[in-house]
Amino acid sequence: MCDTQALVKKTIKAAQHTGHQTIALSGGVACNQALQSQLIKAAAHAGLKVQLTPPALTTDNAAVIAFAALLASENRPPDPLNLGINPNLSLGQ
């Protein structure tokens, strides 16, 4: 099963599990036309609707994360240059 098929299958299953009738496709992945086509077809077969985000409003997730980091950094003093860095920490730590 390719990545697109896995995303579609899991998305349909999640919508059915949660009882949602509409699936919103957004972020950088929303521009993937193969994903759009397969998701619309699978959703229609499952009796669900798909709401696509206009391409001009889709962004790469990395841009959203960077913007969130910028906003968070504006509300605290800068870190010292000798700050210990651990790249293996999870986002919750």
Image (cartoon, rainbow, N blue to C red):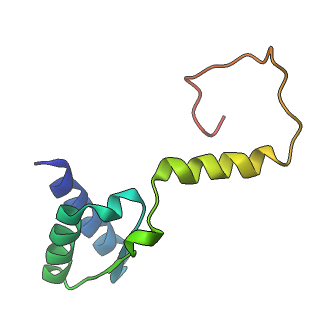
The residue furthest front is 56
Q: Is residue 44 left or right of residue 78?
A: left
Instruction: Say how many tags the image has.
Output: 0
Q: For this view, does 33 lie left or right of residue 67?
A: left
| Image: 88 above or below 25 | above
Q: Position of residue 40 (x, y in %)?
A: 20, 76
Which residue is at 19% across, 55% downward?
Answer: 4
Left or right: 2, with 88 as reference point: left
Q: Residue at x 12, y 80 (%)?
A: 45
Q: Position of residue 12 (x, y in %)?
A: 25, 69
Name the spot of residue 93 as percent of width and height, x first. 66, 34
Q: At 58% across and 22% down in the image, what residue appears?
A: 87
Percent position of residue 49, x then y: 28, 84
Q: Which residue is depicted at the point 47% across and 70% down?
A: 57
Front residue of 89 and 41: 41
Query: 93 above or below 54?
Result: above
Of 63 and 68, which appears nearest the observer?
63
Above or below residue 64? Residue 14 is below
